[in-house]
Amino acid sequence: MSSIAEPALEFRNVTKRYGETTVLEDFDFQLGAGEKVALIGPSGSGKSTVLRIAMALEDIQGGTVRVHGIPLWLDGVAADRAQTRRARARLGMVFQHFHLFPHLSVLENLTLAPRLVNKKKADEAAEQAIALLRRVGLEDKAQAWPEQLSGGQKQRVAIARALALQPDIMLFDEVTSALDPEMVGEVLEVLRELGETTSMSMLLVTHEMAFARQFADRVVFMDGGKVVEAGPPEELFGNPREERTRQFLSRVQPM
Amino acid sequence: MIEFLQTHLPPLVAGLRVTLQLTVGGGICALVLAALAGLARRSSRRWLRWPATVYVEVFRGTSAMVQLFWFYFALPFFGVSLPALVTGVLVLGLNSGAYGAEVVRSAIDHVPRGQWEAGRALNLSDQRILLRIVLPQALPMMLPPAGNLVVELMKNTALVSLITLSELTFAAQVQRAATLETVPLFALTLLIYFVLAQVLLAGVRRIEHYVTRHRGSRA
């Protein structure tokens, strides 16, 4: 079923509405296997919705969504629970507001899903969790409670938690937007390290244009629930073709 | 004073025993009903949600005394005769369970939606998210209102004297009729209820302390 050419994520003719409001309309998008894509655009353009649909956190009203070939939606019909969980197993997601589990220690936050979902033994899960915490620079916080951490530390724990299930695709939903400015750097540094050392596919919704430019293989500009323009970062940032892209960029990165 | 206590305390303590039986029995009954109905009211399945809603609204919306009369005096006409103590436990449990169901439901609803989403993103099933992530966070929110309900239930046990059970209030009435020492007797009765309420609330606080122990770090 899976081949090298098969995309990590595939959206075809996806329509998403909240009541009367249309968020995505005939939305087409592909994330190549191993590709790192930054989704940019004004707020309300549907960027985060794309990630949430990929993780099956949202219903859609029409279209097809595939995760490594596994259909989540086929022409507007949802996959059954087993198939949804098979698709989710390929994905990891990091949220703007972290959503750490406050009643569990940092270590337990990382081991809960591997133990319950992947049936890992406690010591094995803990060992892996410590290794992940080391990777995000927080091995000394294993026994801490989430509330004892700074925002930047919480987000690094959240990243480690998502990695603990060894996903093929990572979804980052405005992961620095809720942080104090001085903590943005430490989280972006973790992303950069991940991007350089792994072959995971990554889809990143961000307002950090400088980081997107550096990090992404391809930048996708969305507005009004559609892809307006997509291309390599140098091209999209340096020489945008579309007027709407130019307008947006001039607003977010005043020269 | 000592003479007064020697005369009145034994019958009051006998009444207290019944009050305690009703409180504990009704409390257990209420706990089970509150958990089941509270969860059912949040279910996506209509056949679970509907009966739970009817139960909660009927028992919240009608008089506990009339419910008691129904179960004790009216049900026998339909061929169901229950002993007075069983009826008391059942009605008190059903009544507090209806309020408790709302406590359970509202506490679960107050756990941020992001917790569910984070759980789903980690590929946990909804049952596991409920059990391992949401309920542990909802439980501390449930306890203060649950403590109020338990005290309320204990005080409502006095209603059961109306269906021939001689619990604490009934025993006090009997003693008063026999001796006419109205003021000291009812003062003592109030004191017993008050102490009982304090004991129950202290118990709930202990549980609260236990379930929030992970926040020991919180200054």
Image (spheres, rainbow, N blue to C red):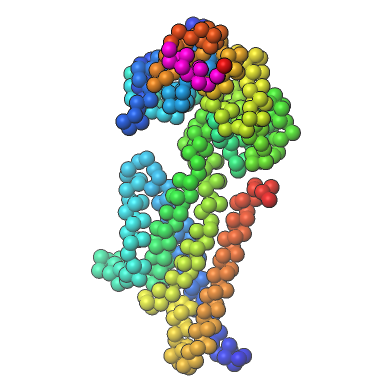
Task: Give coordinates of residue B140: x percent, y percent.
Answer: 56, 52
> Would you say the magenta stretch is mainly helix, strand or loop?
helix
Q: Residue at 45%, 8% (x, y): give it.
A: A241
Q: Please say whether residue A71 is visible from this viewpoint.
A: no
Q: Residue at 67%, 30% (x, y): give it.
A: A182
For the N terminus of chain B, the quadrant is: bottom right
Dividing the picture into quadrants, the one containing residue A23 is top left
For this orientation, the residue located farthest to the front is A255
- Left/right of residue B179 with respect to residue A103 in the rendered view: left
Q: How many numbered discs?
A: 0
Instruction: Confirm whether the magenta stretch covers residue A45.
Output: no
Q: Please say whether residue A143 is visible from this viewpoint.
A: yes
Q: Is residue A197 above or below residue B54?
A: above
Q: Is residue B181 above or below residue B73?
A: below
What segment carries the magenta color?
A: A243-254
Instruction: Confirm whether the magenta stretch covers residue A245.
Output: yes
Task: Give coordinates of residue A193: x percent, y percent.
Answer: 66, 18
For this orientation, the residue located farthest to the right is A140
Task: Give coordinates of residue A48: x percent, y percent.
Answer: 47, 25
Task: Give coordinates of residue A28: x percent, y percent.
Answer: 40, 14
